[in-house]
Amino acid sequence: MERIPVFIPFIGNDTKKHLEDALDVGWLGMGASTKEFEERIADFLNLENRFVVTTNTGTSALHIALRAAGIGSGDEVITPSFNYVADHQAIKMTGANVVMCDIKEENLGIDCEKAEKLVTEKTKAIIPLHFAGIPCNQKEVFEMAEKYNLRVIEDAMHAFGTTIDNKKIGSYGDVTCFSFDPVKIVTSIDGGCVIVNNEEEFKRLQKFRLLGVDKDTTERYKNKRSWDYDVVSEGYRYHLTNIMASVGISQIKRVVEFIESRQKICQEYNKAFKNIEGVKVPQTDFKEISPFIYSLRVLDDKREFLIKHLDKIGIDVGIHFIPVHKHSYFANDRCGDMTVTDRVVKEILTLPLHTNMKSEYVQRVINGITSFFKNN
């Protein structure tokens, strides 16, 4: 029986053609395709007076976003423990201290009431996560940030295309970071971007991603290099190459199709599982959600038994996430009450979700889950 993986990147002939064409140009580094990808991101998100800077990974995007926002040594940044460790490592890379907080039951996003109790005079920023593409309570985040004069750096790695009140995440607010890694809805093999709302931070980001060089971005966008330049700031080798950007371009051209196919599958899952005693489905109809993953919460300590059952019938599953406060490297970092996080991480289970997923795969996943609960 063919196994069903949790993730399958969608790479069509159009992506292969874009990649071949980019190789034929003969300019492999950051260049004109990088600029085009940034422009297409801005167009898709309907950006006005906001600026896009692509990077080689989502983690790089987070790191330079924090630096552009002025976060540095001795500062504190509040973020959920319920996330992948990239955010927390990016905070440490700036010299700042990680402060971890709990999440809310209804959307698994940051609990601002608990986060507020962690604010000190050293707190300079907050990083909320839009888990699985489902928004956290963004209004509460912005209100808390205004109250304490904090920067908001949104981790929208799961949420490229999600809308709130008919506005796409990233098209407003403070700073937003996206990921285009191998398994995201839009991939550039690996990559990310930062979106900011002022030109000064935009220019700082351009320098940060390319070793602090002052002129290189403008020239490289023309598939050229500047041989007369200055190094004017700290900098890193975080730029996105033409080759990776060409893959991103091919993907973003089809992003609406990709999102709609995933929404349909998530809606099928919700319909099939919503009346099963012993599971909790995501509390959304997915109409405004760009779903990166689909996660069930399996109650009554049955998760491990369900995993074994699905493994026997050739269905892979994942667990998002091991909470960061449980990792040894972060054991001494400050954190608040983790009641919800500690419960959720014992229940959460990520099911297979692919762009244009085979209908037989969808049905096998549904049958696998429902058959388990009929007999348990």
Image (cartoon, rainbow, N blue to C red):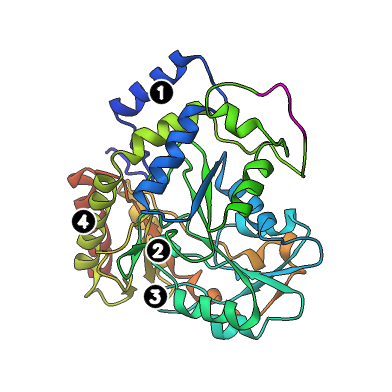
User: At numbered mark 3, what does the secondary structure look like: helix, strand or loop?
Assistant: loop
Magenta stretch in the rendered image: 226-230
Which badge, 2 or 4, is on the more N-terminal residue? 4
Residue where numbered disc 3 is placed: 299
Question: Is 56 located above or below residue 165 in the figure?
Answer: above
- Which quadrant: the N terminus? top left
Q: Which residue is mark 1?
A: 19
Q: Quadrant of the C terminus?
A: bottom left
User: Looking at the picture, which amino acid does disc 4 mark?
Assistant: Lys
Q: Quadrant of residue 74?
A: bottom right
Mark-to-mark CA distance, 2 and 4: 28 Å
- The numbered mark at residue 52 is none
Pinpoint residue 28: horizontal percent, then vertical percent: 54, 21
Residue at 69% x, 81% y: name it. Answer: 119
Which secondary structure lies at badge 1?
helix
Q: Amino acid at mark 2?
A: Phe
Residue hosting label 4: 264
Distance between the Cα atoms at labels 2 and 1? 43 Å
Amino acid type, mark 3: Leu
Q: Residues at badges 4 and 1 in contact (C-beta under 8 Å)? A: no
Label located before the other in sequence (2 or 1): 1
Magenta-drawn stretch contains 228: yes
Does 117 appear above or below 207?
Answer: below
Residue position marked by numbered label 2 in the rendering = 305
Please tell me which residue lies in front, 113 or 65: 65
